[in-house]
Image: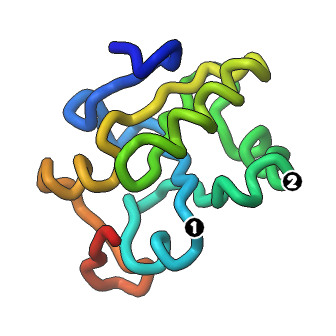
Amino acid sequence: MQFGSVPTVDVDALTSEHFLLDVRENDEWEAGHAEGALHIPMSEFVARYGELTEAAPADGKVYVLCRVGGRSAQVTQYLVQQGVDAVNVAGGMQAWEAAGRPVSDGKGGAGVVI
């Protein structure tokens, strides 16, 4: 599936083995996120790019999430231009939550997608 010229995947295709990158802002992340995802806000992404290259699997894909898929599509496009095997997650965290996937507040409780 493509979002414009950006590789895209549905939430249903993801497993706990996939490497998730959440590019939402801090308040969105703190309200609720996918457990185990790497968080680098889009507004800080270029400056913090090295954190992704250190954490991402050398031979695997990076699955990029935001709230609905717009910001993550932009970051995915940037990553593909950098030679990273990146895929946008269609529908973002709203689709993640709607699919019944767990949302964490990072403090041991249930989170919400804002």
Q: How crowded is mark 2: few (under 14 residues within 10 Å), some or many (20 or more)?
A: few
Q: Residue at x 53, y 45 (%)?
A: 71
Quadrant of the image for the N terminus? top left
The answer to whether residue 50 is left or right of residue 6 is: right
Residue positioned 71% across, 59% down in the render: 43
Q: What element carries label 2?
A: loop
Residue count near mark 1 (Cα–Cα under 10 Å), binned few <14, some 14–19, many ≥20: some
Residue situated in front as seen by the camera: 108 or 93: 93
Residue at 26% from the left image edge and 37% from the top image edge: 11
Q: Which of 30 and 43 is in front in this view?
A: 43
Residue 17 screen position, x and y as percent:
40, 37
Nearer-the-camera pick, 89 or 107: 89
Question: Alpha carbon of mark 2 to alpha carbon of mark 1: how far?
Answer: 15 Å
Q: Which amino acid does label 1 sit on?
A: Glu
Specify the color scheme: rainbow
Q: Which residue is drawn at 55% across and 47% down?
A: 21
The residue closer to the viewer here, 64 or 109, is 64
Find disc 2 in the rendering and name its residue. Answer: 47
Quadrant location of the C terminus? bottom left
* Helix, strand or loop for disc 1: loop
Q: Is residue 100 above or below residue 50?
A: below
Q: In this view, does 91 lie above or below 83?
A: below
Q: Quadrant of residue 75?
A: top right
Q: Mark 1 points at which residue?
A: 25
Task: Name the residue type under label 2.
Answer: Ala
Q: In this view, does 89 lie above or below 36?
A: above
In this rendering, would 96 be left or right of 63? left
Question: Based on the displayed image, in which of its 4 quarters is residue 59 positioned?
Answer: top right
